[in-house]
Image: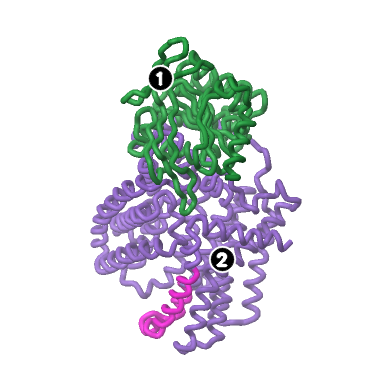
Amino acid sequence: MPELFWNMMKEEWRVHSTMFGSLSFALFPVMIFGIAFMGSFLLPLMRSSFPSNNLALMIHASYLMLGIMVGGFGLLGNEVMNRRFGQASLLAYSARSLPLSEKFIFANFVIKDTVYYFFLWVFPFGLGFILASPFIGVPLANALLLLLTLTLSFLFGLCTVFFLSTIFARSRQVFWLLVLILCIGLGALAIMTGTNPALLFPPLLLFSSFTWANLLVSGIILVILFGVAIMLFNPESVGSEKIYTNSFAPLMKRLSFLPDPPLATKDTLDMYRSGSMVGQVLFSFLLPLTVIWFFLSLLGPYFPPHGLLFMFAIVTGIIASTIYTWVTMFDTFGPYACLPVSVSRLITGKLTTFSLMQAVPAVFIAVVAILMRESLYLLPAVVLCLAVSFFAVGVMVWLTGLSPNVLVYDVKVMAVYLVLIGIVVTLFTGIAFANPWYALSSVILFLPAWLFMKRALVKWNAVDPGGF
Amino acid sequence: MAWKGKCLKTIIRSDGSQQKKTNDGELIFMTVIIQTNDIVKKYGDVTAVDHVNLSVKEGALFGLLGPNGSGKTTMIKMLTGQTRPTGGTSTVLGIDVEKDPVGVRKLVGIIPEQETPPSFLTSMEYLQFVAAIRKIPDIGKKADWWFDFLDFADKKNVLCKDLSRGTRQKLMFTQAFIHEPTLALIDEPLINFDPIMQDLVKDYLAGYVKKGKTVFISTHILEVAEEICSEFAILHKGRLLHTGTIAELTSKDVHLPAFFLSLVRKDSNA
């Protein structure tokens, strides 16, 4: 049914252009094209110090991550839209009003995501590289192959999230069993072949040596992931009522040490009951970081001793800063508009919850340091991770207030964010690479983070809050 | 209302309060609860509210009437500090709304048109949340009274996202009145209620203003406005077309729906 597909495409565009502004959003693929086109001219320079295979690896990993993130958002779409736009509902959730099965709608939804994000993210990048390829001596066939393999990487991310989340929704035991089998399998493979499993990522294999067999393998895996996800997809039954015993008052008592216990309690219950606490930690934190770890570890030889741990700590810090999006995704200012709550108080409340959630990256990076037998540098690694996270969230809050999603597609906002974060990341990567203990100096980042947050409160209090 | 249906002569005093004299010679002191002065709201090129001057007195059940898109919701948003006016000023309970929106929201009760309670709290938890923010004591007892009164005690522990629209409206009604505010501002108060609940709520609102409180409702359901309101204003395309009392219309044997339609049609054709 093409009508459903086209209307879903229109809907996706309108959601984005409403959230980010038509022009800002329309400029987004242009920016991706520009980055790819101009970045391609740096390739000949980079080749001398950084093998192009590794660059390809990083780009494929980024598109895999993008697929994971798009898939994660798609699953939460309806609830997020309701919070952001009031009683909004995506077509993907309209099986109640349309004579179409939920599985059919879901299949259209996945195809829509694939086509939409292909034109938003993948095609502009590929086109930039294709147009630049004659000038940098890259055969056109290689540039076209990159477009194909990046599309496949994106699809792997998307389908993996749909696959894992449908299994997670059906049975948590089966999910964990599957994760265990996958870990053991990858571990065994790594031990037996002495190869990092990331190198066996099918689109990457296809990119390094194109064969029809490799293409077929990628295709079959995607069809299996997608097919199983469709088969197991089980939307929440209509009209079901979830009943909970009253947890608000006891939890608020336990959180009374925090600056704003009612808001912290509400956020905690929101995150726990929406499944964000477990789901987001799994799909938006651990899964991306595991993927990044595999790919980053391949670049280990190019880092100084201990550099991998600190590079990973910085990346974890940046991913950890996105926890702010978890605590804001179900909330707009709307439900608070009938209460004596200012925007600045709400932002402060969200930052409090964010700070509590920073225990997750802190523990994570500590465990990584121990597993890497780098326990000696556990403290500077944790400090660096948290300092980067707080700095990044400070910038994010200053730029976007209660709508951090704006960051993704508003070109102007994203450019400012990238410059500010880029400076800090470059600076502290250099410092940590020079001497691991120097990473402790990153504690100074808490000061600009605090200043950004302070300015954010003033800035966003003076602006009409969106979303109602 | 002591003064309802009587001919009133208004004297506005310098502090904003009003002194009214009935034709029986009875003096009534009334405080202006809501005052807007040339208030304007523009969204880009669209003028949602166009130089509106409005005055609502203590103890009134005031109806802001208008067709869809006439600026009613924007007015409520401006009066409760949810959105800033492009021009003009407004005071609510003596507070400059633009300067202290949170101060206004501390004192009033609000039911927005579309907003629903937070998805992942139960009804009871949401009321506890409201009580914690508003610092309302004895919330358990008060909440139980409302659960019984609006007949949704069986939904006490149900997540808000799973509630029907009608039950959500009951919950939003409860949160607006649970602290017995001096002024309640309600956007479309009855729209999701069944006829039995509508009757109950109308009686409650009538009783509420008898206690000296003020209720400001925005609606396009004219029959309801005629039945429960003491005063009204008609907005059309963001402009104020008329302010008056229901009693004035009744005395002329004119019904509100007919009056409203003739006024709005005349304005549309002008």
Mark count: 2
Q: Where is residue A414, by image quadrant?
A: bottom left
Which amino acid type corresponds to the residue marked 2 in the rendered image?
Tyr
The answer for how far apart the CA atoms under marks 2 and 1 are is 61 Å
Q: Which mark is residue B30?
A: 1
Is residue A453 at all visible to an observer of this figure?
yes
Magenta residue span: A29-58
Query: Image point 24% across, 61% down: which residue?
Result: A437
Q: Are marks 2 and 1 in contact (CB under 8 Å)?
A: no
Query: Image point 28% across, 66% down: which residue?
Result: A427
Name the magenta segment's main secondary structure: helix
Q: Which mark is residue A117?
A: 2
- The residue most toward the right is A99
Front residue of this view, candidates B183 and A427 = B183
Q: Colour of chain A?
A: purple
Secondary structure under tag 2 reads helix
Q: At which x and y percent is residue B92?
A: 39, 31
Could you tell me which chain the residue with mark 2 belongs to?
A: A
In the rendered image, residue A49 lying in the magenta stretch gets the answer: yes
Left or right: where A399 falls relative to B140? left
Q: At which x and y percent is residue B222?
A: 61, 31
